[in-house]
Image (tube, rainbow, N blue to C red):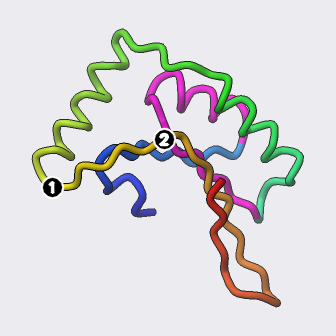
Amino acid sequence: MSANKHQGVRSALCWQEDIAELARLHNNANICTMPARFISLEKAFKIIDTFLNTQFEGGRHQRRVDKIAACKNKYHNEKNNYTIGFFLCSINLWTDCYVSYY
C-alpha cells in the first residue's frame, strides 16, 4: 500500500497478464505486486513474464509519469533509483505474513 510513496517507485497491483502489460506500457511501472491469495504460482509466473517483456510506450504516457515524479520530488528528499522488482504477498493461517522480493 505504501510502495508508491517512495521516490522512484511506480508499483502496480497485477492480478492478470493484461493488467501487468498495461502497467508497463502506460505507467512505466517498475514494481509488480501480486495478490498471492487470489492467483496461482503458475499465473504469477505468467504475469512476471509479461511484466518483464513489456516496454514502456512513452509518448503521451511519459507526461503523466513525469508529473508523478515531479510531485514526488517536491515532497520527498530521497534519491533512490529502483530497478524492476516483484512482491508476492501472502497471509497463511499457519505462519506469519510474509513478503518476498524477487
* Percent of width and height locating residue 8: 34, 43
Q: Does the magenta stretch include residue 11?
A: no
The amino acid on which the numbered mark 2 sits, given as a three-letter code, is Thr
Pointer 2 and pointer 1: residues touching (CB < 8 Å)?
no
How packed mark 2 is, by other alpha carbons closer than 10 Å (few <14, some 14-19, many 20 or more), is few
Residue with the most extreme left position: 74
Q: Residue at x 47, y 14 (%)?
A: 57
What residue does disc 1 label? 77
- Left/right placement of residue 39 relative to residue 12 reads right
Q: Residue at x 71, y 70 (%)?
A: 90
Element marked by disc 1? loop
Residue 23 vs 88, above or below: the answer is above
What residue does disc 2 label? 83
- Nearest to N terminus: mark 2 or mark 1: 1
Q: Give the range drawn in magenta.
A: 16-36
Q: Quadrant of residue 2?
A: bottom left
- Tell which of 9 and 21 is nearer to you: 9
Element marked by disc 2? loop
Q: Does the magenta stretch include residue 27?
A: yes
